[in-house]
Every structure is written in structure tokens, then in C-alpha cells.
Image (spheres, rainbow, N blue to C red):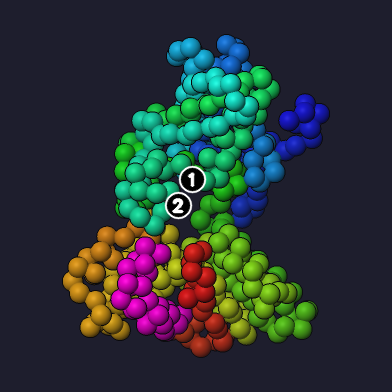
Amino acid sequence: MEKEDEKERKIATEQFVNCGGKMMRCGFTTGSAAAMAAMAAARAAATGTFPDYARIGTPKGWDAVAEIKKRAITGKMEAQCSVKKDAGDDPDATDGIEISAKVRLIPEERAGISVEITGGRGIGIVTKPGLEQEVGSPAINSVPRAMIEENVARVCAESSFTGKAEVEISAEGGEEIAKKTFNPHIGIIGGISILGTSGVVEPMSERALVESIGVEMGVALSEAESRGLGRHIVVTPGNYGEDFLKKRPEFGGIPVVKCSNFIGKAIDFAVEKKAERVTFVGHAGKFVKVAGGIMDTHSHTADCRMEIIASHAALTSFDALDKSDMARILSCATTDAAFDILDETGATGATCRSIIRAAKKHIARRSGGAFRFDFLMFTTTRGLL
């Protein structure tokens, strides 16, 4: 990245968002921290010198900048660097954790650079199917992997290195910090995950977030009315729902309100603000919970996804499933993995229809019939259920 370019780009930790009238500072993800540490270690392995700071571009379009903490030459063309994650003002369990990258460069005569990424101490291992990474792999998700590869390859190219770069990501104290996250419950053991789809952490206090949903909904309903759509809006938890909607032209023009985990509060606001119709669109990972009457879908509040799926499968497809099938569903980490088991016996359709009927009953009860609504549930691999 050119120096002049860098001056013009925003730095994530210097950006603020308005949360209920309070300005809160943004930060960067564990994925960005890992990529910065890896870039610095690659530079040291290639040149023998350590940068004081690392600066990378993020998918958000802002830059992440951090001081290089640990600096060590650990072997021939091998170095280790670390970066402290800065989550800004977000109440993040991994805020302040030190993410390290050890990079070993292996010269090869062939042209080009290949990057191999592994997980070290403090990085969790995937033990259940259905997560983004395969069973047995370190819990380093695809966007952080791409960021690490891109920045290591760039440094290698600048240093005229060709060959293989082996990158090991680790997290100091990751084993203990992971206990405060959802990782143990979904089958990621031994450490934290390296996450982040935007590379940036945008903080939101819970109270401010709930208040902002109400404000946004009021604006969206007025906008819908001005477009001749009546007071009709789409409510979705977040980015997955937005991405799904982009592929469905029938929703074009209907204002979208993101409600995060607060399905119940969104229903309350829709009643209060006199919505005429609400289309709820969400990933099954969250929306299955609504069938159990769970109106705050955050994993720290409640889960029961597998219990809900298993109970509806038993209700609708009792003859097709046996005890071992139920046990397998209950041990799943994701809804897609549970549906894969139901596919084996042809029970997926009936189970999903039963779940959706139950979810609609809970929404109708919460809303008191104040507005008409649709409930659309999908997964990224299956599409609309």
C-alpha cells in the first residue's frame, strides 16, 4: 500500500460510532491482529529487521494499525511477532489478548509464494462438523485466513522471496479466555477462534443498540409509506439476512431493519410504531430459537437449537427417526449439521415446517395480532427453508 494512500484511509481505532448519544470507539478483530502479526513476522524473517508498527487494509475499507509487541528471531528465516487486539469500546472477551504469529520462510526455486496457516497454543480446534472450518482444523476462519495470506505474500514479494511461508498463529492465554466465549458449547476446544468478516469491531452497548433499533424502525416505516408500500418493513438479525435478501429481488425496495439478537424488542417496536406488515428473515441458527419462544437469540442468553430441532423432528417424523438419530442431532454444533442428519431419513421438510409454525405462534402471541407478518428462515448452504 502506498504511503500517500495510507494517509487518506481511515484507521479503525480512530473511528467512533454513536450509541444512544454516546460516542464509542471502534477497534479491530482477532483476524486483523493475526494478519498484522503475521505480516510483521514475515518481514523480519525475510529481512532480519522488525517494524515498530503494522498497518493493513481490512474488508471494511478502513486500515488496522497496531504496535508490534513480541519480536524474536526464532531460527533461520524464521521470526515471531505479536499484536494486542484492540476491540475499542466494545465489551469483547478477547479485548487485549496478545495474538502471535511465527513465520518460517522456506525458499524454493519455483516462482511464486504459497502460504500455509496453522494454529498454535491458545487457538481452538474444531471438533464438530457444520462449522466453517473442517473437524480437526484450527478455528481460523476464512476471511482472517485470506487477510493473513494476502499480507504475508505481499511482504514476501516486496522482499523478492519465492517459496513457502509457514505461518503459525497463537494466542497468549487463549485457553482460559475461550471459556468465557461460546466456543466450548459449539465444539471448539482448547482456545479462541480467529474471527471477523469486516476486520473491524464496531461497538454497541445493549441498551443503545435496542434504542437504535426503535429509531431505525420508525424511519424505515415512514420510508416504506413514502414509497407506496404501506407500513411494511423487513426485519433481519444482521449481515447473513442482508446478504440473503440481496439475492431475492422480490424484497427490493422494502426497507430493512437489523435487529441483532433482539427479535422480541423488534416485535414490540413494530407494534408501538404501528407497522402494518413485517417480514422476518433470518438464518436458522437464530430463528430456530424463536420456535421455542426465545426472543433474545444471543448465545449467552439461550440456545436450545438442537433440542428444538430434535423435538420437532420427533413430533413430525417419529417413525423415520430412532434414538441414535436424536442423539446425533443433540450433539450437533450447527443447524445445518442437524438438517444433514434429517436429510438421511427425509425428515427435514416436515421438521422445518413444524418449527416455522411454532415460531409464528410465538410471534403472533408477542405482537397480539397488531400487524400481519411473514417468517422466512434460511441457511447459507440450503437457501430458503
Residue 46 lies, in percent from the top left, at 58, 16
Tell me the amino acid under the disc marked 2: Glu
Q: Is residue 158 left or right of residue 142?
A: right
Looking at the image, which residue is at 51% across and 21% down?
Answer: 106
Could you say which is closer to the camera, residue 376 or residue 235? 376
- Crowdedness of circle 1 by 10 Å Cα count: few (<14), some, many (20+)? some
Q: Are marks 1 and 2 in contact (CB under 8 Å)?
A: yes
| Residue denoted by label 2 | 132
Q: Between residue 26 and residue 48, name the one nearer to us.
A: 48
Rendered residue at 57%/56% (across/down): 208
Question: Which residue occupies the foreground of this view, 2 or 23?
Answer: 2
> Outermost residue, left direction?
323
**Vertically, is 72 above or below 82?**
above
What residue do we see at 54% from left, 41% from top?
A: 144
Q: Is mark 2 on a helix, strand or loop?
A: loop
- Residue 177: image quadrant is top left
Residue type at mark 1 is: Asn
Residue that mark 1 sits on = 141
**Quadrant housing residue 305:** bottom left
- Is 196 located above or below residue 310 in the figure? above
Q: Is residue 239 magenta?
A: no
| Magenta extent | 336-363
Provide the major secondary structure of the magenta segment.
helix
- Is 359 magenta? The answer is yes
Q: Which residue is drawn at 65% across and 29% down?
A: 154
Label 2 Cα neighbours within 10 Å, binned few <14 / some 14-19 / many ≥20: few
Determine if residue 268 is in view: no
Residue 34 locus on image (x, y percent): 52, 33
Is 326 on the left-hand or right-hand side of 368?
Answer: left
- Residue 124 is situated, as x and y percent measured from the top left of the image, at 36, 40
Q: Does 20 sit left or right of 70 as displayed?
A: right
In the displayed structure, 70 sits above or below 316; it is above
